[in-house]
Amino acid sequence: GVSSTPPPAARRYVYVGRFGAVEAQSACRHVGRLAMPKLPEEREALVDLFQAAVDAGKMSRTWPGNTVWLGGQFNPTQRQWMWKDGTPIEHAGWAAGQPSAEGVNQMSEPWLC
């Protein structure tokens, strides 16, 4: 997973591995919290981190090894994707056919911390 650490202006992400939803939150505690890239520069930093993880052999360029979850989930009551801090996800560059878990339990999906 990838963890983010505040403050936002200096936010950095750390790849700590791939985990299920519950495990990701625990794995991230020692370095920060689940990644919630809300700003363009945060999203760019994650893209750079993903590329570095692929180059290092920690992630794949193909599914399922290139699939990660950030600190967000679908809120069935509000019928929208929300960050773990309760704010709506306003910008999402979903790939074609995504998000695949909308309206279902995402606890079995891999999360990125």
Image (tube, rainbow, N blue to C red):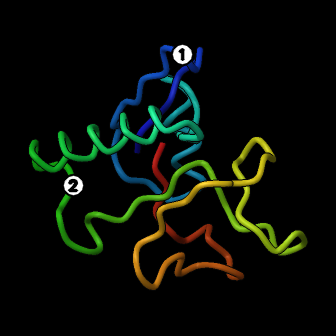
Asked whether, in this view, residue 79 is left or right of residue 65, the answer is right
Instruction: Name which residue lies at 54% across and 76% down.
Output: 99
Q: Residue furthest bottom?
A: 97
User: Mark 1 — residue?
Assistant: 9
Give the class, few, some or many, for how many residues have Cα within 10 Å of label 1's Cα (few <14, many ≥20): few
Find numbered disc 1 in the image and state the secondary structure of the residue it sits on.
helix
Q: Residue 110's spot in the image, x, y percent?
A: 46, 62
Quadrant for the N terminus, please. Answer: top left
| Number of residue marks | 2
Question: Given the image, on which type of amino acid does mark 1 rest?
Answer: Ala
Q: Residue 55's spot in the image, x, y percent?
A: 9, 45
Asked whether, in this view, residue 110 is left or right of residue 64, the answer is right
Instruction: Name which residue lies at 71% across and 47% down.
Output: 84
Instruction: Name which residue lies at 67% across and 76% down.
Output: 105
Viewer-nearest of discs 2 and 1: 1
Front residue of 110/93: it is 93
Q: Residue 102's spot in the image, x, y percent?
A: 65, 79
Front residue of 33/20: it is 33
Q: Residue 8's spot in the image, x, y percent?
A: 58, 20
Find numbered disc 2 in the image and state the secondary structure of the residue it sits on.
loop
CA gap between label 2 and label 1 equals 27 Å
| Circles 2 and 1 in contact, beta carbons < 8 Å | no
Residue 14 in which image quadrant: top left
Which one is earlier in the sequence, the residue at label 2 or at label 1? 1
User: Mark 2 — residue?
Assistant: 59
Give the class, few, some or many, for how many residues have Cα within 10 Å of label 2's Cα (few <14, many ≥20): many
Residue 80, above or below 69: below
Instruction: Name which residue lies at 59% across and 40% down.
Output: 38
Residue 15, above or below 66: above
Question: Given the image, on which type of amino acid does mark 2 rest?
Answer: Met
